[in-house]
Image (tube, rainbow, N blue to C red):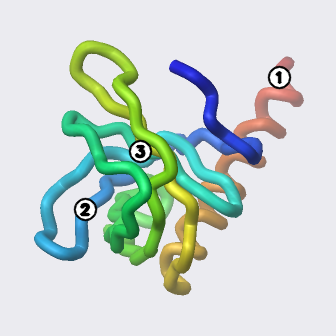
Amino acid sequence: MKDHRQFARKSVHTNVSIFNETDAKFLGGLVDYSETGIMISSYQPITADTIYRFTMVDLPNNIGRKRTGHIQVKSVWSEQINGTLFGTGFKLIEADDEAYAMFKSYDERLLLQQQKENKNG
């Protein structure tokens, strides 16, 4: 798969489900993110150059409750990753406070994991 990223993205270390707000259909999972965009994997191709409103849902281990955030994105590219999955990159247009809080918590968790690896490494 060709790397289309313009900014370094960070991996997500929890399951984050992505739903289309229009019809509440499950689209796929968040693969990685940056300050300006996200990538999701899905079983169906997603049309490029289209604006979407997504609901992000996660259930992080450390808080024990479901979190929901809402984002508006524009699909930039989409291609088949393997025989069953498609990868799609999106430019982040807008995010609500909860979505920003979710992204921030992923950053904090990633930082803690890196610190632990450096200490044990």
* CB atoms of marks 2 and 3 within 8 Å: no
- Position of residue 6 relative to residue 71, above or below, is above
- Position of residue 8 relative to residue 61, above or below, is above
Q: On the rendered structure, is 31 left or right of 4? A: left
* CB atoms of marks 3 and 1 within 8 Å: no
Q: Residue furthest front?
A: 49
Image location (x, y in percent) of residue 4: 62, 35
Image location (x, y in percent) of residue 71: 44, 74
Q: Assess disc 3: are there few (<14), some (14-19) or many (≥20) residues with their C-alpha within 10 Å of its C-alpha.
A: many
Query: What residue is disc 2 on?
Result: 19
Q: On the rendered structure, is 2 left or right of 34? A: left
Query: What residue is disc 1 on?
Result: 120
Q: For numbered disc 2, what is the local secondary structure? A: strand
Quadrant assignment, res 92: bottom right
Give amino acid for label 3: Ile
Query: What residue is disc 3 on?
Result: 40
- Position of residue 78 relative to residue 20, above or below, is above
Q: Assess disc 2: are there few (<14), some (14-19) or many (≥20) residues with their C-alpha within 10 Å of its C-alpha.
A: some
Q: For numbered disc 3, what is the local secondary structure? A: strand
Give amino acid for label 2: Phe
Which residue is at the front of the view, 90 or 27? 90
Q: Which residue is drawn at the image coordinates 39% and 68% (left, top)? A: 51
Q: Earlier in the sequence, mark 2 or mark 3?
A: 2
